[in-house]
Image (cartoon, rainbow, N blue to C red):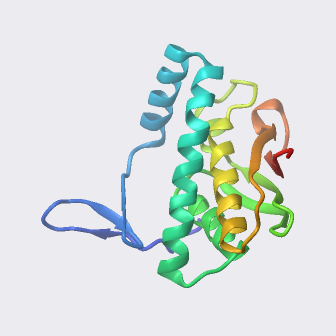
Amino acid sequence: MMQPLLPIEVDEETGVWSTDGLPMLYVPRHFFTNNHLAVEAALGRERYAEILYPAGYKSAFFWCDKEAKTHGLKGLAVFEHYLKRLSQRGWGQFAFLSANADAGDAEIALWHSSFVLQQPGVTGRLCYMFEGWFAGAMDWVGQSEGRDYRTVSRETQCAAEGHAHCTFRVTPMAA
């Protein structure tokens, strides 16, 4: 079993968990997924996805900026670090299939998605929550390198549809 090398500090006074200076929450996968599904049911999947996308985008952009400064990383190495940290935190196992920071283009694979694992027998594209995250990370990379693109990210296939893994495509928005 892989042991994540994820530094977790716990403040003895407040009980706040943090990694690399960022406060964290540690919750069971079923708890998070059940809350996710309750909001999806209340709002409808399409509306919920519309809300999640910019929130995830903003959070990924912020995270990349913070982690770049904390670890002295630059460019695409920050996005790679982001995928590593997501993998270490139980969301699934993420890896670039391809990435071109100059063009704002990437394809990301996700094996063992927490959303797929927590919903056995459910089919469809279950991992849409990650879409905004990857656009936010790529746009941070582009901005940090003086590029003027803005990207969009979409889940193009999901393991819950019978594929070996989920795939996300990040592309520049049309001008």
Left or right, 116 with reference to 107: left
The residue sitting at 66% across, 72% down in the picture is: 144
The residue sitting at 60% across, 21% down in the picture is: 47
User: Eyeballing the image, is 34 above or below 117?
Assistant: above
Q: Quadrant of residue 138?
A: bottom right
Q: Position of residue 88 (x, y in %)?
A: 56, 63
User: Eyeballing the image, is 41 above or below 16?
Assistant: above
Q: Position of residue 67 (x, y in %)?
A: 52, 72
- The quarter of the rendered structure image containing the N terminus is bottom right
- Residue occupying the far left of the picture: 13
User: Eyeballing the image, is 40 above or below 166?
Assistant: above
Q: Position of residue 164 (x, y in %)?
A: 84, 45
Q: Quadrant of residue 84?
A: bottom right
Q: Quadrant of residue 160?
A: top right
Q: How many marks?
A: 0
The residue sitting at 57% across, 58% down in the picture is: 61
- Residue occupying the far bottom of the picture: 72
The residue sitting at 71% across, 74% down in the picture is: 145
Of 73 and 130, nearer the camera is: 73
Of 63 and 15, nearer the camera is: 63
Q: Position of residue 16 (x, y in %)?
A: 25, 60
